[in-house]
Image (cartoon, grey):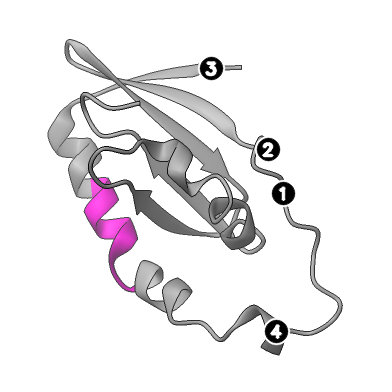
Amino acid sequence: MTGRTDLDRRTVLCAITAASGSILTSALLAGPASAQSSTQPAVAGPTDFEPIDVKIKDNTVFVRRYGSGSPVLLVHGFPRSSLMWRFVAPLLAVDHTVICVDLRGYG
């Protein structure tokens, strides 16, 4: 199911900036997976995400959302799309809400 939300660009960018600060840093600096306990929660697969179309004035931004918990924002580089995070996002989604966004003109 695809949800549509009408927001202006400034609201989206402010929300992304506020949510990504120290949460992203702590998620990336966490210990290696081998140091975790043997009773880990099940990891979602690369296709277990919620697709969302965010309507911003005359444009639509595609977002993939995985898991629940404190938010982590993953932004792709040139010339990729949010699909590049398909194997990393499910691992982070064990205890985070992972947002993978397609930058304008990509994906």
Check disc 2: other Cα within 10 Å, few if <14, some if 14-19, many if 20+. Answer: some
Point out which mark residue 20 bears: none
- Contact between marks 1 and 2 (CB within 8 A): the answer is yes
| Residue 53 included in the magenta stretch of the image | no
Q: CA distance from mark 2 to mark 4?
A: 23 Å
Q: CA distance from mark 1 to mark 4?
A: 18 Å
Check disc 4: other Cα within 10 Å, few if <14, some if 14-19, many if 20+. Answer: few
Residue indicated by mark 2: 48
**Quarter of the figure with residue 82:** top left
- Disc 1 vs disc 3: which is toward the camera? 1
Q: CA distance from mark 4 to mark 3?
A: 36 Å
- Disc 2 vs disc 4: which is toward the camera? 4
Magenta span covers which residues?
15-22
x and y percent of residue 94 in the render?
Answer: 67, 61
Q: Amino acid type of disc 1?
A: Ala
Q: Amino acid type of disc 2?
A: Asp
- Residue at (48%, 48%) from the top-left corner? 85
x and y percent of residue 22 in the render?
Answer: 33, 73
First of labels 1, 4 by sequence position: 4
Point out which mark residue 44 bears: 1
Residue indicated by mark 4: 34
Q: Is residue 90 above or below residue 61?
A: below
- Disc 1 vs disc 4: which is toward the camera? 4
Residue indicated by mark 3: 2
Check disc 1: other Cα within 10 Å, few if <14, some if 14-19, many if 20+. Answer: some
- Residue at (39%, 69%) from the top-left corner? 23
